[in-house]
Image: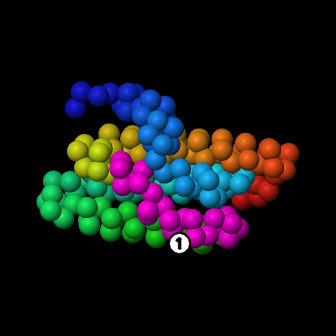
Amino acid sequence: MTTSYSQIFRDGLWDNNVAMGQMLGLCPLLAVTTSATNGLGMGIASLAVLLLTNTLISLIRGIVTPQVRIPVFIVLIASAVTLVDMAINAWLHPLYKVLGLFIALIVTNCAIFGRAESFASKNAVLPSIVDALAMGIGFTWVLVAGGAMREILGSGTLFAHASL
């Protein structure tokens, strides 16, 4: 692989960010980011799902045939979302009560599937982890910025109910 880790990271944060550059996965921005705290929670949940799925898909990329790759990717993404959903419910229950159904809807986020298909299925584990971190941080940044703008304009506060 000729691409450096710093280039992969820069692409994920800015140049090829799934939310800003490709306008994918913006449903959470519109639906749940009524505050910066909600944006941060949803972004971290998405980052965790990206990390899990990119790692797993990169590990199994050599044994999954092209005929079954899409169903396998969907099952892995759904499993990762379920794990993240259960973890947030167990350890961050107040955030879980706010985000609720939207955590489970991460499975339908085309940005997650897009990274699995376009990057993790074609690269080794470490570059896939770097890509997941960068894309997840970039996506979180967009969700927090959108939530912060909505919170400031709507209630004149910023991180007002951040008691996680």
Question: Residue 136 location, x and y as percent?
Answer: 49, 46
- Is residue 112 found inside the magenta-colored segment of the image? yes
For residue 39, side relative to residue 125 (left or right):
right
Query: Which SS does the magenta portion mostly show?
Result: helix
For residue 92, side relative to residue 115 (left or right):
right
Question: Residue 55 location, x and y as percent?
Answer: 33, 52
Q: Quadrant of the C terminus?
A: bottom right
Type of the residue with mark 1 = Met
- Is residue 89 found inside the magenta-colored segment of the image? no
How many labels sit on residues? 1
Question: Residue 147 location, x and y as percent?
Answer: 69, 48
Residue located at (25% from left, 43% from top): 123
**Residue tagged by mark 1?**
86
- Residue 41 visible in this rendered orientation of the protein: no
Please tell me which residue lies in front, 22 or 126: 22
Question: Residue 46 location, x and y as percent?
Answer: 50, 54
Residue located at (41% from left, 45% from top): 132
Secondary structure under the numbered disc 1 in the rendered image: helix
Q: Residues within 10 Å of mark 1 (few under 14, many from 20)?
A: some
Residue 100 versus residue 110 in the image, above or below? below
Q: Which residues are magenta?
A: 94-115
In the rendered image, which quarter is residue 65 located in?
bottom left
In the rendered image, which quarter is residue 27 located in?
bottom right
Please tell me which residue lies in front, 86 or 153: 153
Please tell me which residue lies in front, 102 or 12: 102
Residue located at (48% from left, 61% from top): 106
- Residue 57 visible in this rendered orientation of the protein: yes
